[in-house]
Amino acid sequence: MAQIRVEALDKSFGTFHAVKSASFTVEDGQFLCLLGPSGCGKTTTLRMIAGLELPTAGTIRLGGEDVTMRRASARDIAFVFQLFALYPHMNVRHNIGFPLKCEGVGAAERNRRVTEAARILRISHLLDRSVSGLAGGDRQRVALGRAIVRQPKCFLMDEPLGALDTEMREDMIDELRALHDRLGATTVYVTHDQLEAMAMADVIAVMNQGHVEQVASPRDIYDRPASLFVADFIGSPPMNFLPFRGSLAMGTQAIRLGEREVTIPVTREALAEGDLVLGVRPEHVRFSDRGMVRGEVYGVEYLGTTQIITVTTRYGALKARTPASMPFRTGENVGLDFRADTISIFDKQSGRAIRTGLHEGGPHG
Amino acid sequence: MAEVEIRAVSKSFNKSPAVNDLSLTIQDGEFVALLGPTGAGKTTTLRLIAGLEAPDSGSIHIGGRDMTREAPADRDVAFVFQQYSLYPHLTVFENMAFALRAPGRRQPEAIIRTKVEEVARLLHIETKLHNKATQLSGGQMQRVAIGRALVRAPSIYLMDEPLSSLDAKLRGEMRLELKRIQTDVGATILYVTHDQTEAMTMASRIGVIEAGRLIQIGTPREIYENPINAYVAARLGQPAINLLPAHLFAGIPCGVETIGARTEHLTIAQDGTGVPATVKRIEHLGDQSHLHLDLAGQPVVTLSDPDAGLGAGDIVSLNLNNPLLFDADGERVAA
């Protein structure tokens, strides 16, 4: 097992700049998710780590060794693809054992490792079945089995659950994380699905248009987004944004939003007058008759335990998550307040989060 | 728009029943979602109504008329498929206008233009109207496919997982918009999905379907709060309902085999007043934190208050308040 270190990685395809100076480190045994929308450069980054693409610039270190220009087969990694390509004419046992056969591993050792991989993935009962009759989840387990038997230094996975339907995906998320906990292999996992990333990753690297926007724990990514992009991409529904104009002095604890003062985490930097954005998560919006932002209920989405209320305001549509027991009517006039210690402030121009007390101390809700 | 009624419809493929004695009435202006896993018979039900399949028995009535033997084109339904199929050589406008220009239903061009532009605005594709369909992203193409149905005013819209290919953010927006559009124009919609959030947030009533049978139908709140059996209970709720052996708790009425406990049925305390459970881990999913507990070997997942200060290894006590009760067959037992 090994640390993966990616430093100032760049990749251009002709005039298209796919990856722009990406840097991050995956510690030995860590599970890192590369998360971003399609076209953000996450798969290209993964393919460079695997050796399936050569970077235009930058270095990749595996366990301290520079492998940037080394062939894929000499990197001791296993790649799991979104579209699990299994050999249809082979049964499960032969599919899983195939990489070992290619490496010239003897039959007895091969059998031992295939049996062990099948046990870990709970598909021992399927070993002699043909792969063509298997359900999606089981096919993906076989594909994982083929990666596990090689006992590589690290796993690289490209949306391995993308082809499964919702219920199967939720089961597989739990399974993959449990598998990681058992094997302890350094893993880089590419996905556009934030739920997968939040549920599985130790560390998430959010990518946007070739840039790594933030590398942090799922909790920090959610609670302390480094940019407008991250705040908008993570969360379902995403963070609410209220644009305003103003300046920030160092140590400020309030901003002016319209006619009202809004308490925010204390600022740790000063900013000249400009366009700013206040960001607040739906679960930190509260209803209050004397609330500082007024609006009209546009839609109520019942979710069982909770509900999402969409309110149209002068700042645009804002969403609040509340217990499902609170009654709301469409068209109703309501007032909103925000939980002060959770508020993010962004510079609209650069999209960057302003440093405040939010970025200090322990986690909050 | 019109009322649609399915009476005791059955359909088998190669002797395996896909839809089994299913009866369902969709009222004029109602949004009904059929919720169930892959292979439950949801799509077949839609196809039977559309006339793309013929039932083995039973009948289908649209606006009071028996349509069971009518051709699809004569049924006045609009179908939105999961896999959008647009005409690649036509623009977005032409794709959306296509059905309105069809022989026999042809409408004046001025009306077509107004209608297409109005629907394009609702779907946020008004700036793409003159693009070729192939120049769009997947999400935009799916909206065109929905738009192509919305420009018509059929008796019923039949929608087969129309949002499943969209990304999470767009899906969230489209849920709200689709519901809004449906309410505004008073459309009748039968919507098939395996996504509980879509069913819960958009439907006036949800029909839960399993192995070709309609198990329960009711408002989202009825289905969520008052499921008739453990299968239905497990379809809705995030985290999923905990189905626990009754013997783990004291004072459970006789005949009850399984306790169905959602987050709101569980009180977590640290005062030793209830059944002890061990905290395994707390999963921070952003908007929700899931508390994973071990209760005498049974996993329990509930929403946790992020400020509760619990950590792995802590012992908590669980108390039930008005949980759902099920018998040995998984049927609901009155509390």
Image (cartoon, coloured by chain):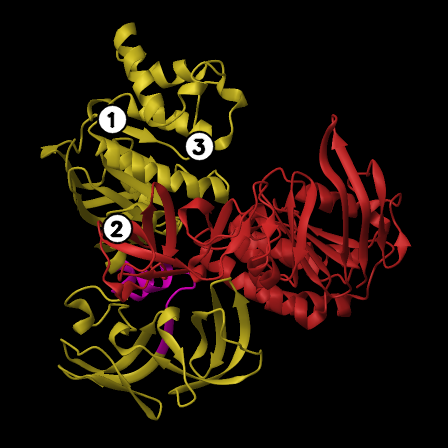
Chain colours: A yellow, B red
What chain is tagged by disc 1? A
Q: Quadrant of the N terminus of chain B?
A: bottom right
Left or right of A48 on screen, residue B262: right
- Foreground tag (1 vs 2): 2
Label 1, secondary structure: give it.
helix
Query: Looking at the image, which is closer to me, B37 or A357?
Result: B37
For badge 3, the amino acid type reads Leu
What chain is tagged by disc 3? A
Query: Looking at the image, which is closer to me, A353 or B238?
Result: B238
Both marks 1 and 3 on one chain: yes
Left or right of B21 on screen, residue A224: left
View extreme (bottom): residue = A259
Which residue is the site of mark 2? A205
In the displayed structure, would residue B149 be above or below residue B51?
Answer: below
Q: Label for residue A72?
A: 1
Q: Are marks 3 and 2 in contact (CB under 8 Å)?
A: no
